[in-house]
Amino acid sequence: MSDLTFAPHEHGVIRLFALDMRPEEAKFLREPGAADQVMGVDGLDPDQIDIFPVSDLEDLGLYGYLHEGGGVSEDQLDRSMLEAIEGWAMVVRSAAFGGRAAQLTPDPRLHLLGLFTEEATNWTGGAIETESAKPFSAPQTPIDNDAQRRVGSALMAVLALLVIGGALWLIL
């Protein structure tokens, strides 16, 4: 397999690999640092790498795993190709690289089966036509007269100063 390049700050990309190795070797890839070795890069986040026998997915299959579990749109997936995959698979999410660029030199027993992108959330919305959404649509409230509050606060401050001054005069 040729070298793979991962762009810095890449997100929302899922890569599916077939593992051409014995089950014991594939299980070992779950150990810390083992996936780093087989991918040819250091510092991968093991929480963002799934290694499993395809048979464990039972009725869900790789198609369901990627579509329902990974958020990959149906138009990117080839159901017949995914159903034909047997043995062990490895799913690597972009987050495994922690936003760093990476040049991979994977083990020859890894075969890239596909690169898929997660469906992005559409944050756009239409114009809001309601009266309450218009600027300055709320009724204007009259401005309160703060003169009474200020007089009361000033009186309390003078009284506090007199008490403190009297206490100091008695002490000295």
Image (cartoon, rainbow, N blue to C red):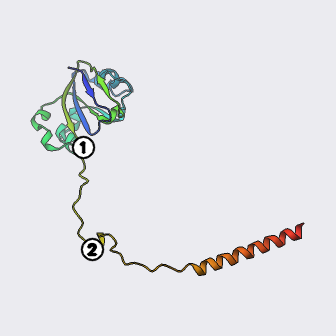
- Give the amino acid type for the residue marked by disc 2 in the picture: Glu
Find disc 1 in the rendering and name its residue. Answer: 69
From the viewer's side, name the closer residue of 146 and 127. 146
As measured in the structure, the alpha-carbon distance from the residue carrying label 1 to the one carrying label 2 is 41 Å
The structure residue drawn at horizontal position 34% and vertical position 23%, both measured from the top left corner, is 41
Can you say whether 20 is above or below 162 in the image? above
Quarter of the figure with the N terminus: top left
Q: In this rendering, would 84 be left or right of 149?
A: left
From the viewer's side, name the closer residue of 136 and 24. 136
Task: Name the residue at the left extreme.
Answer: 80
- Look at discs 1 and 2 and give the one toward the viewer: 2
Q: Is residue 130 visible?
A: yes
Number of numbered callouts drawn: 2
Q: Position of residue 35 (x, y in %)?
A: 33, 25
Can you say whether 55 is above or below 155 in the image? above
Task: Name the residue at the top extreme.
Answer: 108
The structure residue drawn at horizontal position 24% and vertical position 43%, both measured from the top left corner, is 69
Mark 1 or 2 closer to N-term? 1
From the viewer's side, name the closer residue of 11 and 113. 11
Find disc 2 in the rendering and name its residue. Answer: 131
Q: Position of residue 135 (x, y in %)?
A: 32, 69
Q: In this rendering, would 72 be left or right of 165?
A: left
- What is the secondary structure assignment of the residue under circle 2? helix
- Give the amino acid type for the residue marked by disc 1 in the picture: Gly
- What is the secondary structure assignment of the residue under circle 1? helix
Can you say whether 23 is above or below 49 in the image? above
Q: Residues within 10 Å of mark 1 (few under 14, many from 20)?
A: few
The structure residue drawn at horizontal position 88% and vertical position 71%, both measured from the top left corner, is 170
Q: Residues within 10 Å of mark 2 (few under 14, many from 20)?
A: few
